[in-house]
Image (spheres, rainbow, N blue to C red):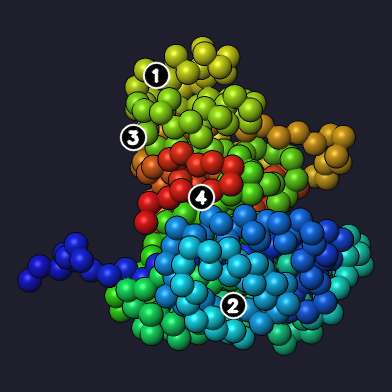
Protein backbone atom coordinates (compact mmCIF):
# COMPACT_ATOMS: atom_id res chain seq x y z
CA UNK A 1 0.00 0.00 0.00
CA UNK A 2 1.33 3.44 -0.93
CA UNK A 3 1.23 5.75 2.08
CA UNK A 4 2.56 8.77 0.21
CA UNK A 5 0.21 11.71 0.01
CA UNK A 6 -0.85 12.78 -3.44
CA UNK A 7 0.21 16.26 -4.62
CA UNK A 8 -3.41 17.38 -4.27
CA UNK A 9 -3.70 16.39 -0.60
CA UNK A 10 -5.21 19.45 1.09
CA UNK A 11 -3.28 20.84 4.02
CA UNK A 12 -5.07 22.86 6.64
CA UNK A 13 -3.11 26.08 7.00
CA UNK A 14 -3.40 28.03 10.26
CA UNK A 15 -2.04 31.57 10.41
CA UNK A 16 -1.54 32.74 14.00
CA UNK A 17 -1.29 36.42 14.95
CA UNK A 18 -0.76 37.89 18.38
CA UNK A 19 -2.70 41.06 19.18
CA UNK A 20 -1.03 44.45 18.70
CA UNK A 21 0.71 46.44 21.41
CA UNK A 22 -1.50 47.50 24.32
CA UNK A 23 -1.55 49.93 27.22
CA UNK A 24 -0.59 47.13 29.63
CA UNK A 25 2.31 46.16 27.35
CA UNK A 26 3.50 49.76 27.51
CA UNK A 27 3.12 49.93 31.28
CA UNK A 28 4.75 46.57 32.00
CA UNK A 29 1.70 44.96 33.60
CA UNK A 30 0.42 41.40 33.57
CA UNK A 31 -2.62 41.19 31.30
CA UNK A 32 -3.67 37.56 31.55
CA UNK A 33 -7.36 37.00 30.93
CA UNK A 34 -8.30 40.46 32.21
CA UNK A 35 -10.00 42.80 29.77
CA UNK A 36 -8.74 46.20 30.90
CA UNK A 37 -6.01 46.99 28.36
CA UNK A 38 -6.61 48.43 24.90
CA UNK A 39 -4.45 49.05 21.84
CA UNK A 40 -2.05 51.97 21.81
CA UNK A 41 -1.70 54.28 18.82
CA UNK A 42 1.35 52.27 17.76
CA UNK A 43 -0.69 49.11 18.23
CA UNK A 44 -3.34 50.32 15.79
CA UNK A 45 -0.65 51.17 13.23
CA UNK A 46 1.06 47.78 13.60
CA UNK A 47 -2.27 45.98 13.27
CA UNK A 48 -2.77 47.76 9.94
CA UNK A 49 0.67 46.67 8.70
CA UNK A 50 -0.22 43.14 9.78
CA UNK A 51 -3.47 43.24 7.84
CA UNK A 52 -1.60 44.42 4.74
CA UNK A 53 0.88 41.55 5.13
CA UNK A 54 -2.00 39.07 5.34
CA UNK A 55 -3.64 40.24 2.11
CA UNK A 56 -1.82 37.47 0.24
CA UNK A 57 -4.08 34.87 1.87
CA UNK A 58 -7.68 33.99 1.08
CA UNK A 59 -8.99 33.01 4.48
CA UNK A 60 -11.93 30.66 4.83
CA UNK A 61 -12.62 31.64 8.43
CA UNK A 62 -11.23 33.81 11.21
CA UNK A 63 -11.21 32.85 14.89
CA UNK A 64 -10.53 35.41 17.61
CA UNK A 65 -10.31 35.72 21.36
CA UNK A 66 -13.23 37.62 22.91
CA UNK A 67 -10.93 40.05 24.76
CA UNK A 68 -10.97 43.70 23.69
CA UNK A 69 -7.32 43.96 22.64
CA UNK A 70 -7.78 41.08 20.20
CA UNK A 71 -11.11 42.38 18.93
CA UNK A 72 -9.52 45.76 18.21
CA UNK A 73 -6.60 44.11 16.40
CA UNK A 74 -8.98 41.96 14.37
CA UNK A 75 -11.09 44.91 13.27
CA UNK A 76 -8.04 46.74 11.93
CA UNK A 77 -6.86 43.59 10.12
CA UNK A 78 -10.32 43.12 8.60
CA UNK A 79 -10.22 46.68 7.33
CA UNK A 80 -7.02 45.89 5.43
CA UNK A 81 -8.24 42.50 4.18
CA UNK A 82 -11.49 43.76 2.72
CA UNK A 83 -9.54 45.91 0.24
CA UNK A 84 -8.41 42.80 -1.66
CA UNK A 85 -10.50 39.87 -0.43
CA UNK A 86 -14.03 38.85 0.35
CA UNK A 87 -14.20 38.77 4.13
CA UNK A 88 -14.71 35.31 5.64
CA UNK A 89 -16.93 34.60 8.66
CA UNK A 90 -15.46 35.68 11.99
CA UNK A 91 -15.98 33.50 15.07
CA UNK A 92 -15.36 34.72 18.62
CA UNK A 93 -13.92 31.71 20.43
CA UNK A 94 -13.66 31.62 24.26
CA UNK A 95 -11.00 28.90 24.05
CA UNK A 96 -8.65 31.51 22.58
CA UNK A 97 -8.80 33.64 25.74
CA UNK A 98 -5.40 34.40 27.26
CA UNK A 99 -3.94 32.46 30.19
CA UNK A 100 -5.47 33.37 33.54
CA UNK A 101 -2.93 34.99 35.85
CA UNK A 102 -5.42 35.37 38.70
CA UNK A 103 -4.28 37.86 41.36
CA UNK A 104 -1.31 39.01 39.26
CA UNK A 105 -3.51 40.52 36.56
CA UNK A 106 -3.05 44.28 36.44
CA UNK A 107 0.10 44.20 38.59
CA UNK A 108 3.43 45.51 37.32
CA UNK A 109 6.05 42.91 36.38
CA UNK A 110 8.54 44.38 38.84
CA UNK A 111 5.92 44.45 41.59
CA UNK A 112 5.26 40.73 41.18
CA UNK A 113 8.97 39.94 41.01
CA UNK A 114 9.62 41.75 44.30
CA UNK A 115 6.50 40.82 46.29
CA UNK A 116 6.01 37.23 45.12
CA UNK A 117 9.63 36.19 44.67
CA UNK A 118 9.18 32.45 45.24
CA UNK A 119 6.10 32.17 43.04
CA UNK A 120 7.74 34.34 40.39
CA UNK A 121 10.78 32.05 40.33
CA UNK A 122 8.50 29.05 39.82
CA UNK A 123 6.64 30.87 37.03
CA UNK A 124 9.88 31.71 35.25
CA UNK A 125 11.75 28.45 35.70
CA UNK A 126 9.07 25.74 35.92
CA UNK A 127 5.88 27.20 34.41
CA UNK A 128 4.24 23.77 34.18
CA UNK A 129 4.42 23.52 37.99
CA UNK A 130 3.31 27.09 38.66
CA UNK A 131 0.06 27.29 40.61
CA UNK A 132 -2.26 29.72 42.34
CA UNK A 133 -3.40 28.46 45.75
CA UNK A 134 -2.12 24.95 44.93
CA UNK A 135 -5.32 24.25 43.04
CA UNK A 136 -5.11 26.06 39.70
CA UNK A 137 -2.24 25.42 37.27
CA UNK A 138 -2.63 28.13 34.61
CA UNK A 139 -0.17 26.77 32.03
CA UNK A 140 -1.56 23.24 32.21
CA UNK A 141 -5.11 24.58 31.86
CA UNK A 142 -4.08 26.74 28.91
CA UNK A 143 -2.61 23.71 27.11
CA UNK A 144 -5.86 21.80 27.67
CA UNK A 145 -7.74 24.77 26.26
CA UNK A 146 -5.49 24.80 23.17
CA UNK A 147 -6.00 21.08 22.56
CA UNK A 148 -9.75 21.55 22.77
CA UNK A 149 -9.54 24.33 20.19
CA UNK A 150 -7.64 22.12 17.74
CA UNK A 151 -10.15 19.31 18.23
CA UNK A 152 -12.96 21.72 17.46
CA UNK A 153 -11.69 23.36 14.28
CA UNK A 154 -9.33 21.00 12.43
CA UNK A 155 -11.99 18.58 11.24
CA UNK A 156 -14.43 21.39 10.51
CA UNK A 157 -11.94 23.30 8.34
CA UNK A 158 -9.96 20.49 6.72
CA UNK A 159 -8.05 21.74 3.68
CA UNK A 160 -8.84 25.38 4.40
CA UNK A 161 -6.82 28.44 5.41
CA UNK A 162 -7.74 29.85 8.81
CA UNK A 163 -6.64 33.03 10.58
CA UNK A 164 -6.40 32.91 14.38
CA UNK A 165 -5.96 36.21 16.23
CA UNK A 166 -5.22 35.65 19.90
CA UNK A 167 -2.61 36.24 22.62
CA UNK A 168 1.04 35.53 23.32
CA UNK A 169 0.36 32.77 25.83
CA UNK A 170 -2.53 31.29 23.87
CA UNK A 171 -0.53 31.18 20.64
CA UNK A 172 2.43 29.55 22.39
CA UNK A 173 0.09 26.87 23.75
CA UNK A 174 -1.50 26.37 20.32
CA UNK A 175 1.89 25.95 18.65
CA UNK A 176 3.21 23.74 21.44
CA UNK A 177 0.25 21.35 21.42
CA UNK A 178 0.39 21.19 17.62
CA UNK A 179 4.08 20.23 17.42
CA UNK A 180 4.36 18.17 20.62
CA UNK A 181 6.18 20.66 22.82
CA UNK A 182 5.76 20.09 26.56
CA UNK A 183 4.32 22.78 28.89
CA UNK A 184 7.67 23.14 30.68
CA UNK A 185 8.90 24.96 27.54
CA UNK A 186 6.05 27.48 27.70
CA UNK A 187 8.44 30.46 27.91
CA UNK A 188 10.74 29.17 25.15
CA UNK A 189 8.63 30.26 22.17
CA UNK A 190 8.45 33.97 21.46
CA UNK A 191 5.26 35.61 20.26
CA UNK A 192 5.76 39.31 19.62
CA UNK A 193 2.93 41.80 19.28
CA UNK A 194 1.56 41.31 15.73
CA UNK A 195 4.03 38.49 15.11
CA UNK A 196 2.83 36.07 12.42
CA UNK A 197 3.28 32.30 12.65
CA UNK A 198 2.09 29.45 10.44
CA UNK A 199 1.16 25.82 11.06
CA UNK A 200 0.12 23.22 8.50
CA UNK A 201 -1.86 20.09 9.33
CA UNK A 202 -2.37 16.97 7.26
CA UNK A 203 -5.92 15.60 7.02
CA UNK A 204 -7.15 13.80 10.16
CA UNK A 205 -4.01 14.74 12.07
CA UNK A 206 -3.93 16.95 15.17
CA UNK A 207 -0.15 17.31 14.94
CA UNK A 208 1.09 20.06 12.67
CA UNK A 209 4.28 21.33 11.08
CA UNK A 210 5.56 24.74 12.10
CA UNK A 211 6.29 26.49 8.79
CA UNK A 212 7.44 29.78 10.27
CA UNK A 213 7.38 31.46 13.66
CA UNK A 214 7.00 35.04 14.88
CA UNK A 215 7.67 36.91 11.65
CA UNK A 216 7.75 40.67 12.32
CA UNK A 217 9.39 42.00 9.15
CA UNK A 218 6.09 43.64 8.15
CA UNK A 219 6.55 45.90 11.19
CA UNK A 220 9.89 47.12 9.87
CA UNK A 221 11.93 44.87 12.18
CA UNK A 222 14.98 43.08 10.81
CA UNK A 223 14.83 40.63 13.71
CA UNK A 224 12.11 40.19 16.37
CA UNK A 225 12.73 42.40 19.37
CA UNK A 226 14.45 40.72 22.29
CA UNK A 227 11.85 39.72 24.85
CA UNK A 228 14.41 39.07 27.58
CA UNK A 229 16.70 42.07 27.11
CA UNK A 230 19.99 42.64 25.32
CA UNK A 231 22.11 40.17 27.28
CA UNK A 232 23.77 36.85 26.60
CA UNK A 233 24.04 35.17 23.21
CA UNK A 234 21.78 35.25 20.18
CA UNK A 235 22.38 32.51 17.61
CA UNK A 236 21.09 32.85 14.05
CA UNK A 237 20.94 29.36 12.55
CA UNK A 238 21.32 28.89 8.80
CA UNK A 239 21.47 25.57 6.95
CA UNK A 240 24.64 24.95 4.96
CA UNK A 241 22.31 24.02 2.09
CA UNK A 242 21.66 27.76 1.80
CA UNK A 243 25.30 28.81 2.24
CA UNK A 244 26.38 28.59 -1.42
CA UNK A 245 23.74 31.12 -2.37
CA UNK A 246 23.95 33.21 0.77
CA UNK A 247 24.68 36.40 -1.14
CA UNK A 248 21.34 36.13 -2.96
CA UNK A 249 19.51 36.38 0.35
CA UNK A 250 19.48 40.14 0.74
CA UNK A 251 17.81 39.57 4.10
CA UNK A 252 21.00 37.98 5.47
CA UNK A 253 23.31 40.58 3.97
CA UNK A 254 21.05 43.29 5.35
CA UNK A 255 21.51 41.78 8.80
CA UNK A 256 25.27 41.89 8.38
CA UNK A 257 25.26 45.41 6.98
CA UNK A 258 23.19 46.63 9.93
CA UNK A 259 25.85 45.31 12.31
CA UNK A 260 23.31 42.89 13.77
CA UNK A 261 25.83 40.05 13.30
CA UNK A 262 29.18 40.22 15.07
CA UNK A 263 30.54 36.70 14.61
CA UNK A 264 30.44 34.03 11.91
CA UNK A 265 30.64 30.38 12.95
CA UNK A 266 30.60 27.25 10.80
CA UNK A 267 31.03 23.56 11.38
CA UNK A 268 33.74 21.61 9.57
CA UNK A 269 31.29 20.24 7.00
CA UNK A 270 30.63 23.68 5.51
CA UNK A 271 32.52 24.63 2.35
CA UNK A 272 34.95 27.51 2.81
CA UNK A 273 33.53 29.31 -0.22
CA UNK A 274 31.78 31.72 -0.04
CA UNK A 275 32.00 31.85 3.77
CA UNK A 276 35.57 33.12 3.96
CA UNK A 277 34.81 35.70 1.29
CA UNK A 278 31.79 36.83 3.31
CA UNK A 279 33.87 37.10 6.47
CA UNK A 280 36.52 39.20 4.72
CA UNK A 281 34.00 41.42 2.94
CA UNK A 282 32.14 42.29 6.12
CA UNK A 283 35.14 42.09 8.48
CA UNK A 284 33.52 39.38 10.60
CA UNK A 285 35.54 37.13 12.90
CA UNK A 286 35.12 33.57 11.56
CA UNK A 287 35.49 30.38 13.56
CA UNK A 288 35.14 26.84 12.22
CA UNK A 289 34.31 24.26 14.89
CA UNK A 290 33.75 20.54 15.05
CA UNK A 291 30.11 19.57 15.60
CA UNK A 292 30.71 18.25 19.11
CA UNK A 293 32.39 21.54 20.06
CA UNK A 294 29.25 23.43 19.01
CA UNK A 295 27.10 21.26 21.26
CA UNK A 296 29.58 21.53 24.14
CA UNK A 297 29.57 25.31 23.75
CA UNK A 298 25.78 25.38 23.75
CA UNK A 299 25.71 23.38 26.99
CA UNK A 300 28.23 25.79 28.53
CA UNK A 301 25.99 28.73 27.65
CA UNK A 302 22.85 27.02 28.94
CA UNK A 303 24.41 25.86 32.21
CA UNK A 304 26.44 28.97 32.99
CA UNK A 305 25.81 30.50 36.43
CA UNK A 306 22.89 32.93 36.46
CA UNK A 307 23.48 36.28 38.05
CA UNK A 308 21.78 39.62 37.82
CA UNK A 309 23.10 41.90 35.10
CA UNK A 310 22.04 45.53 35.19
CA UNK A 311 21.49 47.61 32.06
CA UNK A 312 24.97 49.14 32.22
CA UNK A 313 26.62 45.71 32.36
CA UNK A 314 24.35 44.17 29.74
CA UNK A 315 25.89 42.94 26.53
CA UNK A 316 24.58 40.84 23.68
CA UNK A 317 26.66 38.92 21.16
CA UNK A 318 24.95 37.79 17.96
CA UNK A 319 26.52 35.03 15.90
CA UNK A 320 25.50 33.66 12.51
CA UNK A 321 25.91 29.88 12.62
CA UNK A 322 26.07 28.04 9.29
CA UNK A 323 26.04 24.29 9.78
CA UNK A 324 24.67 20.95 8.63
CA UNK A 325 20.97 20.25 9.04
CA UNK A 326 21.88 17.49 11.47
CA UNK A 327 23.78 19.84 13.77
CA UNK A 328 21.09 22.52 13.58
CA UNK A 329 18.48 19.91 14.48
CA UNK A 330 20.57 18.92 17.52
CA UNK A 331 20.86 22.55 18.61
CA UNK A 332 17.09 23.01 18.31
CA UNK A 333 16.45 19.74 20.12
CA UNK A 334 18.57 20.92 23.03
CA UNK A 335 16.54 24.13 23.11
CA UNK A 336 13.03 22.65 22.88
CA UNK A 337 13.38 18.86 23.16
CA UNK A 338 11.56 18.20 19.88
CA UNK A 339 12.79 16.84 16.55
CA UNK A 340 10.08 18.11 14.21
CA UNK A 341 11.39 21.55 13.22
CA UNK A 342 12.70 21.96 9.67
CA UNK A 343 14.56 25.22 9.12
CA UNK A 344 16.00 24.70 5.63
CA UNK A 345 15.36 27.92 3.66
CA UNK A 346 14.70 29.69 6.95
CA UNK A 347 16.68 31.55 9.57
CA UNK A 348 16.08 30.31 13.11
CA UNK A 349 16.88 32.64 16.00
CA UNK A 350 17.68 31.41 19.51
CA UNK A 351 18.34 33.78 22.39
CA UNK A 352 20.27 32.65 25.47
CA UNK A 353 19.62 35.57 27.87
CA UNK A 354 22.03 36.08 30.75
CA UNK A 355 19.54 36.14 33.64
CA UNK A 356 17.24 33.33 32.52
CA UNK A 357 17.31 29.59 33.10
CA UNK A 358 15.90 28.86 29.65
CA UNK A 359 16.61 29.76 26.05
CA UNK A 360 14.05 31.35 23.72
CA UNK A 361 13.28 30.45 20.12
CA UNK A 362 12.61 33.98 18.89
CA UNK A 363 11.63 33.11 15.36
CA UNK A 364 11.85 30.89 12.31
CA UNK A 365 11.94 33.39 9.48
CA UNK A 366 11.67 32.87 5.70
CA UNK A 367 14.90 33.64 3.87
CA UNK A 368 13.40 34.97 0.67
CA UNK A 369 13.17 38.68 0.02
CA UNK A 370 11.01 40.60 2.46
CA UNK A 371 10.28 44.29 2.45
CA UNK A 372 9.86 46.31 5.61
CA UNK A 373 6.08 46.40 5.24
CA UNK A 374 5.20 43.17 3.46
CA UNK A 375 5.57 39.52 4.38
CA UNK A 376 6.50 37.30 1.44
CA UNK A 377 6.47 33.56 2.10
CA UNK A 378 5.71 30.39 0.19
CA UNK A 379 2.07 29.42 0.29
* Residue 141, percent from left and from top: 62, 82
Label 1 and label 3: CA atoms lie apart by: 12 Å
> Would you say the residues marked 1 and 3 are in contact, meaning their CB atoms lie under 8 Å apart?
no
* Residue 361, percent from left and from top: 57, 51
* Residue 241, label in figure: 3
Most foreground residue, 85 or 58: 85
Which numbered disc flags the more N-terminal residue, 1 or 4? 1
Q: Residues within 10 Å of mark 3 (few under 14, many from 20)?
A: some
Q: Secondary structure at mark 4?
A: loop
Q: Which residue is mark 2?
A: 64
Label 1 and label 4: CA atoms lie apart by: 28 Å
Q: Secondary structure at mark 1?
A: loop
Which numbered disc flags the more N-terminal residue, 3 or 4? 3
Which numbered disc flags the more N-terminal residue, 2 or 1? 2
Label 3 and label 4: CA atoms lie apart by: 23 Å
> Would you say the residues marked 2 and 1 are in contact, meaning their CB atoms lie under 8 Å apart?
no
* Residue 274, label in figure: 1
Q: Which residue is mark 4?
A: 375
How many numbered marks does the figure carry?
Answer: 4
Considering only vertical position in the picture, is 296 above or below 119?
above
* Residue 99, percent from left and from top: 68, 76
Label 3 and label 2: CA atoms lie apart by: 38 Å
Considering only vertical position in the picture, is 337 above or below 9?
above
Which numbered disc flags the more N-terminal residue, 1 or 3? 3
Q: Secondary structure at mark 2?
A: strand
Residue at 50 percent of width and 70 percent of height? 163
Considering only vertical position in the picture, is 101 above or below 301?
below
**In front: label 2 or label 1:** 2
Amino acid sequence: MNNLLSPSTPFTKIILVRHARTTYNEQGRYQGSSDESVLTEQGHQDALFTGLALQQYNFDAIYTSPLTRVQQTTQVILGALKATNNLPPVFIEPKLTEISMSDWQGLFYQEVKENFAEDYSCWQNTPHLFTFNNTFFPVIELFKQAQQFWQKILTKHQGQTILVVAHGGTNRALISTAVGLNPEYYHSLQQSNCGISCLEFLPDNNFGELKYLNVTSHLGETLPKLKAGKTGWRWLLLSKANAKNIVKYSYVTRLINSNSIELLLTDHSVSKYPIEELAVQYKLPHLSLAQNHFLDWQQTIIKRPKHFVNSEQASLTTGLIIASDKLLAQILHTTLNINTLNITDHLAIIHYPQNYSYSILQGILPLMEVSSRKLTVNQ
